Amino acid sequence: MYNSNVPSRAELPSSKQLLRSTIIAAVSAAVLLITVILPAEYGIDPTGVGGVLRLTEMGEIKTQLAAEVAADAAVDAQSPGSGASPLPAQEPPALAMNSGAATAAPLASVPAQATWKDEERFTLSPGQGIEIKLVMKEGAKAEYVWAVIGGVVNYDTHGDGGGRSISYEKGRGVPEDEGVLTAAFTGNHGWFWRNRGEANVDVVLRTRGDYSELKRVQ
């Protein structure tokens, strides 16, 4: 305890060395903040590195989930004594299927005999989410229609690619939607759905138009 060697003044780091180490640490922290933390936590990708590492999508999902939680909390606060989110359990209108199968989706503006390029069907358990994207070039258009069987969902129609991101439309407690998605830039454009109800729901998505691929992100 009393025999420990005390470093001499010459062995201690100089003020310049301490300043240099501080600057290096600050620059390293800034680089990590911009290239990793901002994309992964907030979906902000000023350098494009987050998109390459697929961190931007993670950040967008986290941001969306936080917004949904905040919105649900606000609804609960307005309804004291109610622990469940007051989402109406609506049945979507009957869907005219190309194959004749009994499903549901809105086709008010689309002829029943129309041919769809892709069709996806999936089940969401309570709290579960799924994301489906279309690979599109800037200005490309894709027609879509989706509907929920047995309930409603929260959704976010958005896009990302090349370090850019955009949210086209969001909704809470929605049983169906249809329209034309126009790509604001070249990249992945599509939908994220989450079931905030207390029972499983089925979702049917149909798409057609100018896109090269339809893929499930998660």
Image (tube, grey):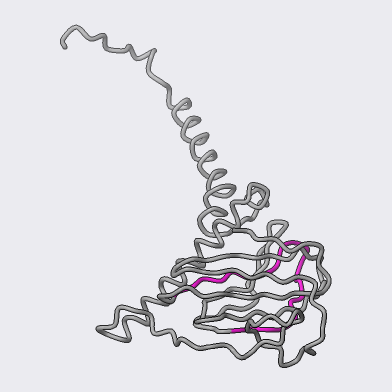
Q: Which span is picked out in magenta? A: 176-196
Indicate yes or no whether the magenta region holds residue 192: yes
Residue toward you, 19 or 141? 141
Residue 33 at what x, y percent from top left?
53, 48
- Asked if residue 154 is positioned above or below residue 66 in the image, the reply reads below
Q: Residue at x 53, y 38 (%)?
A: 28
Q: Residue at x 82, y 72 (%)?
A: 139
- Asked if residue 198 is positioned above or below residue 57 in the image, the reply reads below
Residue extending furthest left?
Answer: 2
| Quadrant of the rendered image containing residue 66 | bottom left
* Image quarter (top left, top right, bottom left or bottom right) of the N terminus: top left
Instruction: Left or right? Give the position of 11 relative to 63.
Output: left
Indicate yes or no whether the magenta region holds residue 200: no
Residue 23 at what x, y percent from top left?
51, 36
Q: Residue at x 41, y 21 (%)?
A: 13
- Asked if residue 214 is positioned above or below residue 155 in the image, the reply reads above
* Image quarter (top left, top right, bottom left or bottom right) of the C terminus: bottom right
Instruction: Left or right? Give the position of 203 relative to 209.
Output: left
Residue 153 at what x, y percent from top left?
52, 77
Q: Residue at x 43, y 22 (%)?
A: 14
Residue toward you, 121 or 34? 121
Residue toward you, 59 or 110? 110
Instruction: Left or right? Give the position of 113 relative to 151.
Output: right
